[in-house]
Image (cartoon, rainbow, N blue to C red):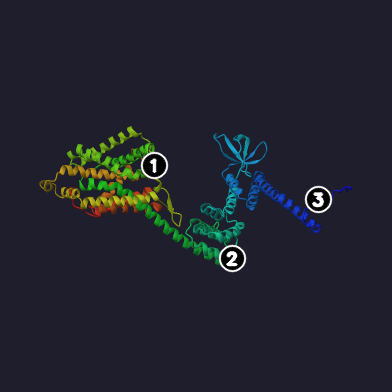
């Protein structure tokens, strides 16, 4: 048998007819091209982003603004970190290579860790003198805020979207109107949506047609934001007083909207002033309610009452210091623990003062005043010796931190609200003790007729001591509250002693309801006068008004018979 040689030919896939060969070859070529096309596209995107970042370091400030706009136009999420670094002045160029890097903090102040803005790679620390900082001015900052607003409108975090909407409102760039409207189509958060609507209206007011400007004014007129008020004011008149809006109808609508916004802002400011007045009144109530017992009920002019407040504040400081050292997990409960502890400390010191000094001076108010004033100096110096003359830090628990804002941007802090509720609670408990308890009955009996009470078997001396201790203990509780809004120092009590006496005298000596009314009245009056005449003149006017009032009603708002009055 003869063997026939076979010539090599083109490779043919098994099982495929000859007519299908061109189609298979075409599919293979397409797959190869597609495989190389994806990385090539990604590389092109990185090259575009890198070129846009490098442009930030070139040219003048005007060129930098154009580079920021070009970088934002790419829509790359990596641009947010670059622009934020540029705003924070943390964007540099390497002096050796000219590459743009983000400066991350390092262990030394003279060093930074260079971060590649394209890949996010963090390099080894380099000295800052090997880098050149990319400078910005106000115009560049405005461009950055506008670009960040457009880039973060689709951020997953509502807080960042809200910041972005506010940035767009401030920039009022017409190019941002389309991204804002696109974001509105998908926005579900009510706060962010309201900010986007306001931002879109601000843009249309700046660059829209007369009909669009009228529609924008109708939207902005529903706001109570001072920024909207400023925007409409700028739209009406420029700095020289010349009209800015050319259309008469639009100008009239803007003026009407501005009046409505100003009325709402004035109303919210009044609400804020009343809230701050009630807050100040609650502080005065806490500081004066103990004095209403020692001065109003017992007739003792206690100039050391402010030092009882100070002792309560320092008790809070010592307790928190111990909790931080031994039981950090209890810190959020520190104020609740400090309330009974401060009451006990200040109350025991008050009883010691009454037993050691005051009981020998009943019926001699001038000697009582001088003696308690001397005691106040002794207590202040004792605290300076133990804790030093500087202010001490008293922390605020998490549940008291934060604030809520009104429609006009007025901030109402949580700690003030807690103090208001706390002051009213202390007032209610003290009222119940005086009216419902056996000790309150004995205290009122001694106040009305000491000899008869003694004849009935009431130990008047101990009633005096416990009454003075009760007033001092409440002052200690006031110190716990005041430690959250004032400096804890040896002079803490001196800031409130005069106001406390004013509250007690104005409300009616010895009357707790008068103390409540006097504290809230003086607090609200002070805060309502401050915006117009200032804090100092406001206090002077309040003092003059109280003096004139006492001339007409010497016993205050609510007169109450007591030992001092009968004497």
Look at discs 2 and 1 and give the one toward the viewer: 1
Which mark is first along the chain, 1 or 2? 2
Determine if residue 481 is in view. yes
Q: Which residue is mark 1?
A: 329
* x then y, percent, for residue 13: 78, 53
Q: Which residue is mark 2?
A: 210
How far is disc 3 from disc 2 in space, using C-alphas? Answer: 74 Å
Tag 3: Cα neighbours inside 10 Å, few (<14), some, or many (≥20)? few
Looking at the image, residue 17 lies above or below residue 127:
below
Which mark is first along the chain, 2 or 3? 3
Secondary structure found at label 2: helix
Secondary structure found at label 3: loop
* x then y, percent, for residue 79: 61, 48
Look at discs 3 and 1 and give the one toward the viewer: 3
Q: Give the left or right position of residue 514, taking residue 84 as reference.
A: left
Secondary structure found at label 1: helix
Tag 1: Cα neighbours inside 10 Å, few (<14), some, or many (≥20)? few
């Amino acid at each position: 048998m003869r063997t026939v040689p076979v010539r090599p030919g083109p490779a043919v896939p098994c099982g495929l007819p000859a007519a299908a060969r061109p189609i298979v070859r075409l599919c293979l070529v397409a797959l190869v091209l597609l495989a190389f096309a994806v990385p090539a596209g990604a590389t092109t995107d990185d090259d575009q982003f890198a070129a846009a970042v490098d442009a930030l370091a070139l040219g003048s400030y005007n060129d930098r603004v154009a580079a920021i706009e070009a970088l934002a136009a790419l829509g790359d999420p990596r641009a947010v970190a670059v622009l934020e670094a540029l705003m924070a002045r943390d964007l540099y160029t390497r002096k050796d290579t000219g590459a743009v890097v983000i400066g991350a903090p390092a262990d030394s102040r003279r060093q930074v860790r260079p971060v590649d803005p394209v890949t996010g790679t963090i390099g080894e620390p380099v000295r800052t003198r090997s880098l050149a900082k990319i400078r910005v001015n106000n115009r560049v900052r405005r461009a950055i805020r506008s670009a960040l607003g457009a880039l973060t409108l689709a951020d997953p975090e509502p807080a960042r979207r809200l910041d972005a909407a506010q940035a767009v409102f401030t920039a009022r760039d017409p190019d941002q109107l389309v991204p804002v409207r696109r974001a509105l189509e998908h926005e579900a958060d009510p706060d962010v949506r309201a900010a986007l609507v306001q931002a879109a209206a601000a843009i249309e007011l700046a660059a829209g047609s007369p009909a669009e400007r009228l529609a924008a004014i109708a939207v902005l007129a529903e706001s109570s934001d001072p920024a909207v008020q400023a925007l409409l004011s700028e739209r009406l008149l420029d700095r020289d007083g010349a009209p800015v809006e050319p259309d008469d109808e639009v100008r009239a609508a803007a003026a009407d909207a501005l009046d409505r916004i100003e009325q709402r802002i004035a109303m919210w400011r009044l609400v804020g002033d009343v809230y701050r007045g009630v807050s100040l009144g609650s502080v005065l109530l806490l500081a004066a309610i103990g004095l209403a017992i020692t001065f109003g009920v017992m007739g003792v002019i206690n100039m050391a009452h402010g030092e009882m407040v100070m002792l309560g504040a320092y008790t809070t400081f010592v307790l928190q210091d111990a909790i931080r050292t031994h039981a950090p997990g209890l810190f959020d409960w520190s104020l609740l623990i400090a309330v009974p502890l401060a009451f006990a400390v200040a109350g025991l010191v008050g009883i010691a003062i009454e037993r050691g000094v005051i009981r020998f001076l009943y019926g001699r108010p001038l000697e009582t005043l001088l003696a308690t004033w001397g005691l106040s100096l002794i207590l202040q110096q004792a605290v300076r010796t133990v804790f030093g003359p500087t202010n001490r830090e008293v922390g605020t628990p998490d549940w008291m931190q934060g604030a809520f804002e009104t429609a006009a941007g007025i901030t109402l802090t949580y700690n003030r609200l807690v103090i208001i509720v706390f002051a009213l609670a202390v007032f209610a408990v003290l009222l119940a003790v005086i009216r419902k308890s056996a000790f309150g009955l004995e205290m009122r009996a001694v106040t009305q007729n000491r000899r008869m009470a003694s004849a009935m078997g009431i130990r008047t001396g101990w009633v005096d001591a416990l009454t003075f201790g009760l007033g001092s203990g409440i002052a200690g509780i006031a110190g716990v509250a005041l430690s959250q809004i004032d400096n804890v120092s040896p002079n803490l009590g001196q800031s409130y002693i005069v106001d406390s006496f004013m509250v007690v005298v104005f409300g009616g000596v010895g009357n707790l309801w008068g103390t409540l009314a006097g504290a809230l009245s003086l607090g609200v009056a002070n805060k309502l006068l401050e915006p117009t005449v200032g804090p100092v003149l406001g206090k002077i006017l309040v003092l003059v008004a109280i003096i004139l009032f006492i001339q007409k009603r010497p016993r205050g708002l609510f007169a109450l018979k007591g030992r001092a009055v009968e004497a």
